[in-house]
Amino acid sequence: MKDEMDSIDSNSVWKLEDLPEGIKPIGCKWIYKKKRHTDGKVETYNARLVAKGYTQKKGINYEQTFSLVVMLKPIYILLYIAATLDYEIWQIGVKTTFLNGYLEESIYMIQPTRYIAKGHEHKVCKLLRSIYGLKQYPTFGLEQNIDGPCVYKHIGDGNVVFLILYVDDVLHIGNDVGTLSLVKLWLTQQFSLKDLGEVNFILGI
């Protein structure tokens, strides 16, 4: 829970304000999840603060809910190409992905349990960035490629780089370590990343 709140604070996800008259804040709750290693053993225990987006009203505090994630077919194809051509296959985790996008709507949320600001108990959180659970949260963050949503590529000077995105998992595929490293460096300047090294297990594959 502390790690989640630290991420929320570092990303300036909300600011405390008095609730405007006539506005009903949405709720939030803590969700707990086990992340397992390839052998099935628990690697980490994660706590995620999730907004109760089901209480949002269309046209008032959200407009769009559609989100694309990569299908398994492109993953299979690119993994086959990488294995055949002996490309590098790296895996990157993007920490708190949905805290990276700014909100356009005015959304107010109650303060999370166990983290209510002392002396400001009557205030609510005005969300500045997207948060898990919101109706519109998947539309924020990285811009999708119109030729292949959630699959990005760069080909030039004999170097090939592919990025495959699935929520907060990224497959980083290419034929040149130097180019891959430069792309990864650029990503680290945009997002908080966890370098998972060479891929050996992703999305249950």
Image (cartoon, rainbow, N blue to C red):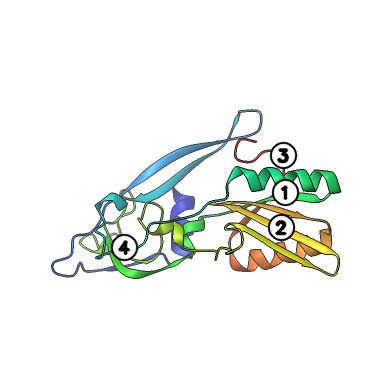
Q: Amino acid at mark 1?
A: Leu
Mark 4 → mark 2, Cα distance in angstroms? 32 Å
Specify the quadrant that holds the C terminus. Answer: top right
Q: Amino acid at mark 3?
A: Asn
- Dots 4, 2 in contact, CB < 8 A: no
Which residue is more in the foreground, 12 or 119? 12
For label 2, the SS is strand
Labels 4 and 2: the sequence-earlier one: 4
Instruction: Look at mark 3 in the image and give the residue it sits on.
Output: 200
**Mark 1 or mark 4, earlier in chain:** 4
Mark 2 or 1, closer to the camera: 1
SS under mark 1: helix
In the drawing, does residue 183 fall left or right of residue 47? Answer: right
Q: Percent from the top left, x then y, of residue 146?
A: 57, 64
What is the number of the mark on residue 58? none
Left or right of 111? Residue 130 is right
User: Which residue in the structure is indicated by mark 4?
Assistant: 62
**Residue at (58, 57) in percent of width and height:** 150
| Residue that mark 1 sits on | 78
Look at 63% across and 68% down and name the residue there. 189
Earlier in the chain: of badge 3 and badge 1, it is 1
Callout 3: 10 Å neighbours few (<14), some, many (20+)? few
Q: Which residue is mark 2?
A: 162
Nearest to viewer (mark 3 / mark 2): 2
Q: Position of residue 28 (x, y in %)?
A: 31, 50
Q: Is residue 34 above or below residue 5?
A: above
Indicate the secondary structure of the residue bearing disc 3. Answer: loop
- Which mark is first along the chain, 4 or 3? 4
Q: Residues within 10 Å of mark 4 (few under 14, many from 20)?
A: some
User: Badge 1 local density, few (<14 within 10 Å), some, or many (20+)?
Assistant: some
User: Is 61 positioned to the left or the right of 149 in the image?
Assistant: left
